[in-house]
C-alpha cells in the first residue's frame, strides 16, 4: 500500500505555478548546508519519487565548470566587522563581490554535486549594478555546452507571470482596465467566465491575488511534448475551463488558468497578441534581447511565431537524474498558456529585469510602468497575518532573514526550477535557475541564504517548544486538505493524495506538519499566545497562520499564500483509504480463494444465493484487477513527465473502469442481502457463517465504493 501513496506523490505536476521552487523562503542559519528542516514543497515530492526508470541515459556526472563572473561596478562601502544588529553588513553596506562569489560558488557547487544538477545560472544585483553573474555546469551534455549567463536561455516557469502582471497594471494605469471590475468586461464573449452557481463575478483583482475560486487542473494539459498538439491561448482557455469551487475573494488558491485569463484580457484590450505585447512593452525597452515567451517549434498557422533561431541555438536542455546518469527530457511546450509560464531568459537579462523592479519600473531612461503600478507592487491585495504572503498585485511577498522584506516569484516546469527575489531595503536582487528536476531546493534557498550570510545576525536554532501549546493540542491536531487541487475526476483523486497535511503537537510543545506539499515533517513553535494561531518555524523565519474559531482551528495558511488548508474528516485521509484498500483486497482474495477451498456442504445454496455468489466473485476479480492495474500505473510514474504527458493513460482508465463496475455491482448486492439471509430450507442454504461473511464483504465494498466516489476515483470517462 505504500506504493499507492507513492503514486499519488509522483503525480504531482501542478508545476508552472507553484512556486515550484518555493514561494516563501524561510530564514536559515548562515552555513553552506541546506536546511534539512525546510525542503521545497514541490521539490520534496519530486525527490520522493526518484527510482530508476528506463530513460535515455546521457553521460555520467560531469565535473562542475563555470562561466565567467561579472563583478559589480558599485563602489563598495568598507564592511564593519559586525553591524550593530550583529549582522556582518548593515543594510546600507554593499556586498563584497569576491566574498559573495566565493560563498555562492560553495553553495551552488555543493548542491550540484549532492543533488545531481547539470547546470545553474545565477545573477545578483545591488544598487543598480551587477555584483555577480555566473554560469555553472552544462546547458547541454551531448554535445557538451557550458552555461553562459549572458546567452544560455533557461525556462523560468511562473516567473513569467510577473511580466503578465506588469502588462496588466500598465493597462490599469492607462484606465483601460479597472481592478474592481469583472474580468468578463475585458474578454471576448466566448472566453468569459461562467457563473456556475456563483452570483459574485470574478474581478480583475481576484486574478492578481489568486482568489478567483478556480479549481486547479494540470495533468495532461499544462505541458505538451509534441508541438503538433499546441493550440492558441484562446482555444486553451475555452477548452480547459476549470470549475469554480469557491466564491471570489474568499481564499487564495494559486491558479495558472487565472494568470492565463489575465494575459488574454490584456491582449484583448490592447489589441495585440500576448507575445508581441510583452516584447514591445517590456522586453525591447529593457533591452532584454535574450528573453522571449515564444517557443522552439515549427511555424504553424494560427499560432504565434516561434522563437527566433538565434535564440533556439542557445536554449538549455532540461534533465532528470537516473542511476545511469543524466537523461535529457524533451522540450516543454507551454505556449498554449503562455502568460502563466512560457518565458525563457538568461541570468544577464533577468539582472536587468530586477534592476528595473528595484527602480520603480524604469531602467536606463526606459519607463516600463509608472508610479501607480510601482506602488501596487509594494501593496498586498489580501489582508493576512504578519509573515503570510498577501500577493502584491501578483508578486509574492517574502520574509527574509534578519527581518528584511522581499518580493518576487518562483517558477518551475518539469525540468527547470527558478527563483527571483528582490529586497528593496537592501537594494538587492537574486535570480537563479537550474535545468534539472532536482534543483528546486537550491533555487528556493539561495536568495535567503545570501541575505542570511551577509545581512542577518547569527540565530540560535532550533527554537524551543512552548509547553503551553500541549494544553491546546486538540485545537490544532487533525488532518487538513489544501484547496489548490482538482475537485473532480481522477485528478481529484491524485490531488487529495498530495494536498493533505497532518498536524500534531509534541509533548515538548512543538507543532509538527507532515505530508502534503512537503515530503518531510516540519516543526513550529507559537508566536505569543498558543491560541493566537500564529506559528514560526523552529529553524527559520517562515510562518504558519491558523484560523481559530470557537477554540478550534478550522484552516491554516502557509507563508507562501498559495493555498488554504481546511480541516477535513477521516474519509479524506489517505491513511484511511489505504486501510480500506487493504481490507478490500483481502476480502476479494478471500472470496476467490473460497471457491477453491470451500467444502461440498458449503456449496448448498438457493437460487438467489447462487446469483449473489457469482456477483461477488466477479466483484472480487474486478477489485483485484483494478488494484493491480493501479500498481502497474505506479511503476511508470517515477518520471513525472510520464504522468503529465500521458495522463490519464489506458492503464489508469481501465483500473478506474473496473472499480466503477465493481462499485455498481455493490449496489446490487446490497439489495439482495435480505434475500440471502432468508434462504431456503437449512439443507439447501448457506451456513450462518457464510451469510455473515457475505454481508460483511458487501458492507466493506460499499464503504470502499463510497470513499472512492468521494475521492473521484470512479470516473474513467474523464481525467
Image (tube, grey):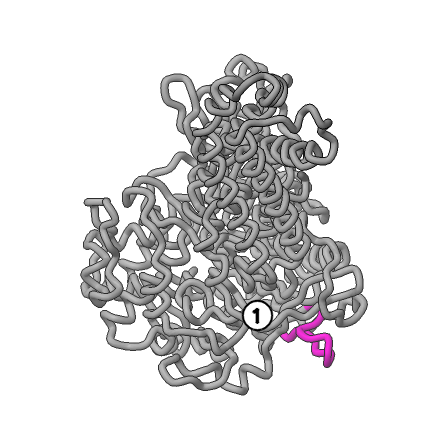
Residue at x 69%, y 24% (from the top left corner): 601
Does 139 lie within the magenta span? yes
The answer to which of 613 and 298 lies nearer the viewer is 613
Residue at x 37%, y 61% (from the top left corner): 240
Please rate how many residues cluster around mark 1, counting C-alpha atoms within 10 Å: few if below 14, some from 14 to 19, many from 20. Answer: many
> What is the x, y in percent for residue 358?
43, 60
> What is the x, y in percent for residue 211?
33, 47
Magenta region, residue range: 136-148
> What is the x, y in percent for residue 581?
60, 35
Residue at x 57%, y 73% (from the top left corner): 331
Q: Which secondary structure lies at badge 1? A: strand
The answer to which of 319 and 664 lies nearer the viewer is 664
Does 128 lie within the magenta span? no
Residue at x 55%, y 67% (from the top left corner): 130
On-image quarter of the N terminus: top right
Residue 512 visible in image: yes
In this rendering, position of residue 325 left or right of residue 692: right
> What is the x, y in percent for residue 47?
67, 50
Q: Give the vertical position of 473 relative to 125 (above or below).
A: above
Q: For residue 318, what is the image quadrant? A: bottom right
The answer to which of 496 and 477 lies nearer the viewer is 496
Q: Give the vertical position of 305 relative to 155 (above or below).
A: below
Q: How many marks?
A: 1
Q: Which residue reaches farthest top?
A: 471
Residue indicated by mark 1: 154
Q: Give the vertical position of 502 relative to 400 (above or below).
A: above
Amino acid at each position: 500500500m505504500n506504493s499507492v501513496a507513492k503514486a499519488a506523490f509522483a503525480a504531482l505536476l501542478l508545476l508552472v505555478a507553484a512556486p515550484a521552487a518555493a514561494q516563501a523562503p524561510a530564514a536559515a542559519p548562515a552555513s553552506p548546508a541546506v536546511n534539512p528542516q525546510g525542503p521545497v514543497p514541490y521539490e520534496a515530492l519530486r525527490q520522493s519519487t526518484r527510482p530508476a526508470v528506463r530513460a535515455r541515459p546521457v553521460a555520467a556526472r560531469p565535473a562542475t565548470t563555470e562561466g565567467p563572473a561579472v563583478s559589480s561596478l558599485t563602489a563598495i562601502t568598507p564592511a564593519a566587522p559586525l553591524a550593530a544588529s550583529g549582522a556582518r553588513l548593515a543594510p546600507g553596506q554593499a556586498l563584497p563581490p569576491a566574498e559573495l562569489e566565493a560563498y555562492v560558488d560553495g553553495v551552488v557547487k555543493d548542491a550540484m554535486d549532492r543533488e545531481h544538477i547539470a547546470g545553474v545560472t545565477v545573477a545578483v544585483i545591488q544598487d543598480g549594478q551587477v555584483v555577480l553573474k555566473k554560469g555553472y555546469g552544462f546547458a547541454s551534455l551531448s554535445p557538451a555546452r557550458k552555461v553562459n549567463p549572458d546567452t544560455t536561455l533557461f525556462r523560468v516557469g511562473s516567473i513569467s507571470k510577473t511580466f503578465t502582471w506588469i502588462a496588466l497594471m500598465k493597462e490599469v494605469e492607462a484606465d483601460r482596465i479597472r481592478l474592481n471590475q469583472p474580468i468578463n468586461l475585458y474578454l471576448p464573449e466566448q472566453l468569459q467566465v461562467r457563473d456556475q452557481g456563483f452570483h459574485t463575478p470574478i474581478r480583475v483583482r481576484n486574478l492578481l491575488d489568486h482568489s478567483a475560486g478556480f479549481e486547479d487542473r494540470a495533468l495532461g494539459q499544462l505541458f505538451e511534448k509534441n508541438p503538433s498538439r499546441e493550440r492558441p491561448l484562446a482555444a486553451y482557455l475555452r477548452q480547459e475551463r476549470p470549475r469554480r469551487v469557491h466564491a471570489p475573494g474568499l481564499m487564495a488558491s494559486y491558479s495558472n488558468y487565472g494568470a492565463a485569463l489575465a494575459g488574454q484580457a490584456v491582449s484583448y484590450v490592447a489589441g495585440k497578441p500576448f507575445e508581441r505585447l510583452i516584447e514591445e512593452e517590456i522586453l525591447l525597452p529593457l533591452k532584454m534581447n535574450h528573453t522571449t515567451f515564444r517557443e522552439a517549434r515549427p511555424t504553424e498557422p494560427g499560432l504565434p511565431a516561434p522563437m527566433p533561431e538565434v535564440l533556439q541555438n542557445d536554449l538549455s536542455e532540461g534533465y532528470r537524474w537516473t542511476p545511469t546518469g543524466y537523461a535529457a527530457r524533451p522540450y516543454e511546450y507551454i505556449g498554449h498558456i503562455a502568460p502563466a509560464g512560457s518565458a525563457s531568459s538568461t541570468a544577464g537579462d533577468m539582472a536587468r529585469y530586477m534592476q528595473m523592479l528595484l527602480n520603480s519600473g524604469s531602467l536606463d531612461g526606459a519607463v516600463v510602468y509608472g508610479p501607480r503600478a510601482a506602488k501596487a507592487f509594494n501593496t498586498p491585495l489580501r489582508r493576512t497575518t504578519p509573515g503570510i504572503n498577501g500577493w502584491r498585485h501578483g508578486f509574492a511577498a517574502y520574509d527574509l532573514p534578519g527581518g528584511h522584506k522581499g518580493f518576487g516569484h518562483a517558477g518551475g516546469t518539469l525540468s527547470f526550477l527558478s527563483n527571483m527575489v528582490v529586497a528593496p531595503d537592501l537594494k538587492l536582487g537574486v535570480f537563479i535557475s537550474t535545468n534539472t528536476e532536482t534543483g528546486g531546493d537550491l533555487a528556493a534557498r539561495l536568495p535567503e541564504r545570501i541575505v542570511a550570510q551577509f545581512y542577518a545576525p547569527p540565530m540560535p536554532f532550533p527554537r524551543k517548544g512552548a509547553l503551553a501549546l500541549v494544553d491546546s493540542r486538540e485545537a490544532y491536531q487533525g488532518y487538513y486538505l489544501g484547496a489548490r487541487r482538482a475537485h473532480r475526476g481522477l485528478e481529484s483523486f491524485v490531488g487529495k493524495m498530495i494536498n493533505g497535511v497532518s498536524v500534531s503537537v509534541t509533548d515538548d510543545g512543538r507543532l509538527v506538519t507532515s505530508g502534503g506539499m512537503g515530503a518531510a515533517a516540519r516543526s513550529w513553535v507559537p508566536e505569543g499566545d498558543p491560541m493566537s494561531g500564529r506559528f514560526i518555524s523552529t529553524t527559520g523565519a517562515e510562518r504558519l497562520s491558523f484560523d481559530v474559531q470557537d477554540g478550534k482551528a478550522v484552516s491554516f495558511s502557509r507563508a507562501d499564500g498559495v493555498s488554504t488548508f481546511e480541516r477535513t474528516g477521516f474519509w479524506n485521509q489517505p491513511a484511511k483509504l489505504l486501510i480500506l484498500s487493504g481490507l478490500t483486497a483481502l476480502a476479494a482474495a478471500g472470496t476467490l480463494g473460497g471457491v477453491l477451498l470451500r467444502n461440498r456442504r458449503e456449496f448448498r445454496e438457493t437460487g438467489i444465493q447462487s446469483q449473489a455468489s457469482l456477483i461477488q466473485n466477479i466483484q472480487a476479480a474486478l477489485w483485484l484487477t483494478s488494484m493491480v492495474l493501479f500498481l502497474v500505473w505506479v511503476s511508470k510514474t517515477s518520471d513525472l513527465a510520464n504522468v503529465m504527458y500521458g495522463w490519464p493513460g489506458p492503464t489508469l482508465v481501465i483500473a478506474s473502469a473496473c472499480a466503477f463496475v465493481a462499485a455498481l455491482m455493490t449496489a446490487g448486492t446490497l439489495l439482495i442481502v435480505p434475500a440471502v439471509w432468508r434462504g431456503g430450507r437449512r439443507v439447501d442454504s448457506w451456513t450462518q457463517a457464510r451469510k455473515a461473511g457475505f454481508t460483511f464483504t458487501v458492507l466493506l465494498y460499499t464503504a470502499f465504493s463510497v470513499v472512492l466516489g468521494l475521492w473521484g476515483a470512479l470516473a474513467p470517462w474523464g481525467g
